[in-house]
Amino acid sequence: MGCKETERLCLTTLWEFLMRWFSSSGVLVSLPLQLLSGGQSALPLSGSIWRQLETLALGLHILSLFFGLAGLLWVVPHPEWVASLPPIGLQAFSLSMGNGGVAYMVFGALAAALMGSRLLGVRRLLMFLLPAVAISLGSELLGTSTGIPFGNYGYLSGLGYKIAGLVPFTIPLSWFYVGLSSYLLARVALQAQRHWLIHFEAIMLGALLLTAWDFVLDPAMTRGSIPFWTWFQPGPFFGMPLQNFGGWMLTGAAFMTVANLLWGEDQPILDRRQLVGPLVLYVANFAFALLMSLGSGIVAPAGLGLLLGLGPALGLWWSAETPSPYRDQPAPPSYPEQDSIPPLQAVEGEAGRDWDTLEDPGWVGAK
């Protein structure tokens, strides 16, 4: 079997797996009715247009990651392959290299938005999305202009239009979708505990999962064959200053805290099946960063990321409650006219004799 046939078979198998998994999960969602009902799911989504859009967005996100890996690790290091392409192939390669990073982050944000509306409802989703985008964009603008809180760095080309000429518009989107998957997985501990520090612990754990992704991603994206940002202030961690990770923890914890406060008492509780989507989103992006680092010969950050990111994420998902087998089954029929009738009870009347009554015993003898 040739290389092209093998690649086509792998892509077909991956796509069929994604479609089969999403079509069989059978969860509830409805964006229009969520907007009208304060963010609560109202219709079964299985087979509906919204669930198909979520499937498509996540599938395109993962395929974009796959093709990005192929281009950065296999095609770019072999310019002779590129030179041998026909004119249309050269144009397609140029287009993919110029817009591939934009595509995978836009598809990731879209998949997270649709997934979040299904799991959280639109209202709670917006309470996470807006602080995540606003706070991360503010941190990135501050960082690229002053060096606080991440250090002195700057973005290169390849990630889309730059806001204020400093930060690509796709960067806050990546903070949102990886941050959402990280925080939903971290909240598993919050669902099982009740002490007052558990909200703080869940936020710190979510910020750590988010930062662990950067442990693996940042070295590969700055020291790979095609860098996407550069550090003007070199540091001890593969050219990065250590304050970068403090900035990641601070930024992630900030927007997770705001979302937690906005949710108030309306905190989401998700089981293991519902957390499969966030887990797939987190693992896909972590695997991309991991393979990028290993492909660039950067091994140590990969081990640190596995220890602090991928391992805890899988453990948290596994420790989540399994869904009840009766969860999706209709409730047993109710007969109000029978259920509302209390059993016959013997009560002592005012005349000193027993009365069989259907009245509430608490009202017997009341004036």
Image: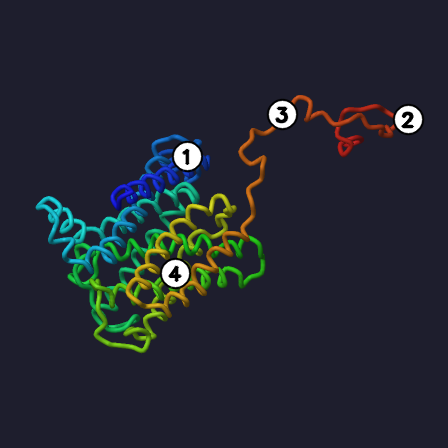
Amino acid carrying label 4: it is Leu
Alpha-carbon span between mark 1 and mark 3: 32 Å
How far is the residue under mark 3 from the one under mark 2?
36 Å
Q: Nearer the viewer, mark 2 or mark 1?
A: 1
Q: From this viewpoint, which residue is outermost toward the right?
A: 352
Q: Quadrant of residue 252?
A: bottom left
Q: Which residue is mark 3?
A: 334
Which dot marks residue 353? 2
Q: Do the CB atoms of the residues marked 1 and 4 lie less than 8 Å apart? A: no
Sequence-wise first label, 4 or 2: 4
Mark 1 element type = helix
Which quarter of the figure is the N terminus placed in? Answer: top left
Q: Quadrant of residue 323?
A: top right
- Within 10 Å of disc 1 (Cα), the crowding (few <14, some 14-19, many 20+) is some
Q: Could you tell me residue 315's position as x and y percent?
A: 51, 56
Q: Secondary structure at mark 2?
A: loop
